[in-house]
Amino acid sequence: MNLKKRYLPKILLPLVQFIFGLGFLTLFIYGIIKFSIDFKIELLIQAIFFLSFIGFIAFHLIYNFLFYLKNISFQENGFAIFEYHKLKTSKVDYNEISGFSNSEVYFGKYTWKSKSLVVYTKSNGVFEILNNYNSSNDKFELELKKHKIKYYGFEEYSTGWYFREYRFSEKLKTTANNTYK
């Protein structure tokens, strides 16, 4: 019996985000070429600010597109997640999962938010699956509950220095350290 199920990423929002990111990247490259051909010292400060702004927007849009878009497929003994920003597939068995929680991710200063599912592995790995970027988050959660994976509850969003900090990963680190001493 083959239980392979695939949950493909939602395509509309990431596609629009990627197209805008490529547009800003093209504008950034065009600005560099145009400025280097028609160099005028009085436009130097304006060009630096303009290119920095356009470059930041292009990077932000393309990075978010690659970071949050994931392809998930379930098999009989676990699931595989293909992460586009790493260009790598991670396979996780059900017995390697310590638990999961629900959460929300905020973009900007509470301008836009997305529900997410955070999966914790016993090796302190964390997978976050956003509802706006991946289809069937509810089915994914039901699949985890069907295999009796521990549910940690709702987890508030907390920012770290660069990446998000996960509340239950610290608990796993201390448990793992106490177990293996």
Image (cartoon, rainbow, N blue to C red):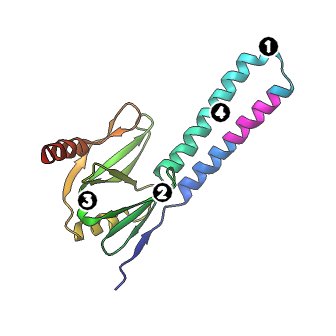
Q: What residue lies at 36% left-to-right and 73% top-to-bottom?
A: 75
Marks 4/1: CA–CA distance: 20 Å
Q: Secondary structure at mark 4?
A: helix
Q: Earlier in the sequence, mark 3 or mark 1?
A: 1
Label placed on residue 54: 4
List x then y, in percent, for residue 2. Answer: 37, 82
Q: Which SS does the magenta portion mostly show?
A: helix
Label placed on residue 88: 2
Examine the structure image and report whether residue 28 is included in the region drawn in magenta: yes
Q: Are the residues tagged 2 and 4 within 8 Å (C-beta)?
A: no
Residue range in magenta is 25-35
List x then y, in percent, for residue 179. Answer: 13, 48
Above-or-below relation of 86 to 143: above
Marks 2/4: CA–CA distance: 29 Å
Q: Which residue is mark 3?
A: 97
Examine the structure image and report whether residue 18 is included in the region drawn in magenta: no
Q: Earlier in the sequence, mark 4 or mark 1?
A: 1
Crowd class of label 1 (few under 14; some 14 to 19; many from 20; radius 10 Å): few
Q: Looking at the figure, which quarter contains the N terminus? A: bottom left
Above-or-below relation of 49 to 42: below
Q: Are the residues tagged 4 and 3 within 8 Å (C-beta)?
A: no
Q: Secondary structure at mark 1?
A: helix
Q: What residue lies at 21% left-to-right and 63% top-to-bottom?
A: 149
Label placed on residue 18: none
Q: Which residue is mark 1?
A: 42
